[in-house]
Amino acid sequence: MSFEVCVENIDELIVKAIKNNDIKVFYQPKYDAVNGRLVGAEALARWITPGGDFISPALFVPMLEQTGLVVDLDWYMLDKTCRFLRQEIDSGRKVVTVSVNFSRIHTKEPDTVNRICEIVDGYGLSHKYIEIEITESALTYSGETVIEFVKNVRGSGFDAAIDDFGSGLSSLNFVKDVPANVLKIDRSLLSGNCENEKERIVLESIFDFAHRLKLKTVAEGVETKEQLGFLRTCGCDIIQGFLFAKPMPEEDFKKLIECSDNVSDSEDILVTQSHASATQLLLDAVFMRFPLIIISNLTKNSFYMMVYENFSTKSCPSTGVYTDLVRHGASTMHPDDRKLFADTFDLQDQISSIKNGQTTRTVITRQLGDDGIYRRVETTNYYVNNPSSEDLLAITLSRTLE
């Protein structure tokens, strides 16, 4: 009896399949884009009938979404995944983080996150081993509800991923607001070997905004070395696709994890490291010393701020008019230092000095921190030329001295 004939009985079939363990968990490995090491996996449902027939998830999952039974499948998948991880840990074997998909329907159930915690905690697992994936379509489906759901997921110590980004009507506004920490780029954005210029520009832009939002990026559906090479130049963090491995049954995944312990890097990381990733590493190092960086266009009287979480005050505006920024900065200084700060970073005086050959200027002042304490702060402007125009730019590096 074919699956198509029984579509109208999908409710009974899925309940029976779950009860009889005909739904199998297959694991598709995820790899570090730079060094090729196994770093995780995604749990995927595969329906195998008692007769050995394989029923594609592309057939049954959409139907389960329509009937609402997909929630039962999600809970089943989470339980099976936790059971597998627990068994591996008890056997003394290595495990990796596994992501589990949750339907948008779950986001409207107030006790979903509590139940996730109950299942994971019931197996005595650290929450770091489970990642919760919500598809991009859920963002437009339930808006504020999804935001609250993801917030609760992250608050409970789980990673949260926006899955299939780029597969539908992507809402950058929702991505900005949803407190997820992983962005999975849909396979539909990768065609051929990424030779299409428009496609490359779109992908580069996605990875750029993802990194600036501090989102870990995962590229799905990677099938060629050329795609991998391009994704490395974009600074992609994790690769998932047939180039490395197809979804596999539990036993095969166990062997893969065991083998991964014995794999040594065949290439020097400094050779394989992408330009974008190297730039991010450099920024991380700079932020260790200078937790506040401002990029200003003195000619256009504008600025953009890159602030790290460890600076003494977070009250500075993130972007706007440069002269307003100087006024704001002066207002946060000790009364005896306000004029010094304002004079040092006077817009017209800086422009005149740059034209006369000045390349830097530094001032040390006392700034009021968010905790109400004045601290000595060193602020230095480095003057650079805009490579695409004649505008005068200033890179401001600021750090607390005590």
Image: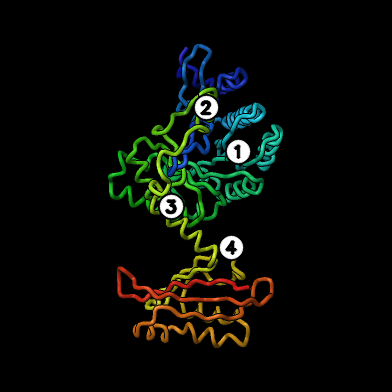
Tell me the tag on residue 309.
4
As measured in the structure, the alpha-carbon distance from the residue carrying label 1 to the one carrying label 4 is: 27 Å
Residue 256 higher or lower than 138, as above or below: above
Give the mark nearest the N terminus, 2 or 3: 2
Give the residue displayed 46% in from the left and 26% down from the top. 59
Residue 102 position in % (x across, y down): 57, 37
Residue 167 higher or lower than 55, as above or below: below
Q: Can residue 168 be seen?
A: no
Could you say whether the residue bearing mark 1 is in a helix, strand or loop? strand
Tell me the tag on residue 277.
3
Give the mark nearest the N terminus, 1 or 2: 1
Residue nearest the viewer, comparing 229 with 389:
229
Amino acid at the residue labelled 4 = Glu
Amino acid at the residue labelled 2 = Phe
- Residue pointed to by mark 2: 253
- Residue pointed to by mark 1: 130
Q: Nearer the viewer, mark 1 or mark 2?
A: 2
Could you say whether the residue bearing mark 3 is in a helix, strand or loop? helix
Residue nearest the viewer, comparing 219 with 350:
350
Q: Quadrant of residue 133?
A: top right
Residue nearest the viewer, comparing 200 with 279:
279
Residue 16 position in % (x across, y down): 60, 18
Residue 122 higher or lower than 51, as above or below: below
Q: Residues within 10 Å of mark 2 (few under 14, many from 20)?
A: some
In the rendered image, which quarter contains the C terminus? Answer: bottom right
As measured in the structure, the alpha-carbon distance from the residue carrying label 2 to the one carrying label 3 is: 29 Å
Amino acid at the residue labelled 1 = Ile
